[in-house]
Structure formats: structure tokens, C-alpha cells
Amino acid sequence: MKSDLFSSDHMAQPAHMPGMSLQNAKSVKYAVNGEMFARQGAMIAYRGNLQFERKGQGVGGMLKRAVTGEGLPLMAVRGQGEAWFAHEAQNCFIVDVEPGDVLTINGRNVLCFDATLSYEIKTVKGAGVTGGGLFNSVFTGAGRLGLMCEGNPLVIPVSHQQPVYVDTDAVVGWTADLATSLHRSQSFGSMIRGGSGEAVQLMLQGEGYVIVRPSEVTPQPQKS
């Protein structure tokens, strides 16, 4: 059988060391030797001796709640083998978190992560009950974090002299030392008259980076 489909560009190769790597732009490969965590339902294939356990509570005391910021549960993956993760053909990225780093990520953008990372759900300070980031996932420790995003994200530097304003439905995450608050860019009267559709943004101030997706969240149809 001959086809470009079977070329090395698409062929899965045996892992040379444990841990996370990009299989391609749309999926992450994880060579499991012990335990790791992933977004529930994101496993698309695996081989080897692996067990997948859905968790409603913390695993080994590390997770206070096994739920991401958008209410999406996580699963523990244990054993020895290889697993592939993806979600709705979104673009995948890997972040190396080092000791002292603090990375806040919207739960909808978390795909998988090393068990060596500490994970906590926190309320976004200043966000009240508005927008798509009321609860975010805060990662610390040392390990790799697999993220996903619809399209290629935009990374914007933030400085004390120049804060950045991001649509609450478009923000993916931000680095430590950035303060957040809600910013209203329209008057109440303008909002009553229909406004521009961009009434409230998340304002980030300090020194660091904010990650933004190239589109707003698509509203999901309500189930009857």
C-alpha cells in the first residue's frame, strides 16, 4: 500500500524517553511511566498498559478539585505506555514550567500535564461574575503543561507603563505578577443603546505576558 499518509510526517514512532511531546500541530503524545493528568475525554489513542481513572476529587492530595476552570473534569492516566491527546482539532502547545513560575490558564485551554505540577483552581481577582474566566487553573512547580487553542494564540507583553485589555472570552492565560480587574469601555447609556459588543474587558497590569486566542468563544447551543 502506497500513500503519503504512511510517510514519516504522520507515522507514530516509539518514544525514546518518558513524558510529553508534540505529535503534530493538533495532538500531544505522552509516554507514560507512572502517572499524568489529562482533560477528560481528550485521549484519542493509546498503546501499552494504561489505566484511565476519572476523578471527582483530588488525586494524591495534589488536586483540590479535579475540575478545570470551565467545569471540565480531569482524569488520571497511570501505568506504562503511550497515549495521544487532542480536542476538536485545536492547535497544541507545550509549556515547560520551571520552579518559581506561576502560570494561570483558562480551564478550556488545558489539555494535559505532568503529575509533578501543582494545580489549583482560583477565582480571577477583579472578575466578579462576568466573562469566561471567573475560575482559572493556576500551575506551579516543575514539569510540562500541554495547552490547546483554536488557531495560533497571540502573546502580548504587559508592562507597568502599558496595561493590556483582553476580551474575557478570548483570554487563554497569563504569567505571574500580573494583576487583573474588569475594565468597562462603554458607558451605561451606550450599552443600553446596543453599544459596540465590546463592553467589558479583563485589564492586566504589571510585568509579564498574556496569551490570547485569535477569536472569541463560540456560544454553545442550550440543551432543551
Image (spheres, rainbow, N blue to C red):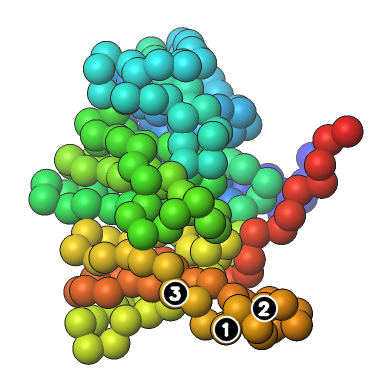
- Residue 15 occupies quadrant: top left
| SS under mark 2 | helix
- Point out which mark residue 191 bears: 2
State which tag comes first along the sequence, 3 or 2.
3
Task: Give the CA distance from mark 1 to mark 3.
Answer: 11 Å
> Does 30 sit left or right of 4 as displayed?
left
The answer to whether residue 190 is above or below residue 94 is below
Q: On the image, numbered disc 1 is attached to which residue?
A: 187
Under mark 2, the amino acid is Met
Under mark 3, the amino acid is His
Residue found 43% across the figure and 45% down from its top: 135
Residue 147, percent from left and from top: 45, 50
Residue found 57% across the figure and 62% down from its top: 169
Residue 82, percent from left and from top: 46, 26
Q: On the image, numbered disc 3 is attached to which residue?
A: 183
Q: Is mark 3 in CB contact (under 8 Å) with mark 2?
A: no
Task: Give the CA distance from mark 3 to mark 2.
Answer: 14 Å
| SS under mark 1 | loop
Q: Is mark 2 in CB contact (under 8 Å) with mark 1?
A: yes
> Does 131 sit left or right of 125 as displayed?
right
Residue found 54% across the figure and 41% down from its top: 70
The answer to whether residue 34 is above or below residue 195 is above
**Residue 25, can we see it?**
no
What number of labels is visible? 3
Residue 60, percent from left and from top: 27, 14
Give the class, few, some or many, for how many residues have Cα within 10 Å of label 2's Cα (few <14, many ≥20): some
| SS under mark 3 | strand
Task: Give the CA distance from mark 2 to mark 1.
Answer: 6 Å
Under mark 1, the amino acid is Ser
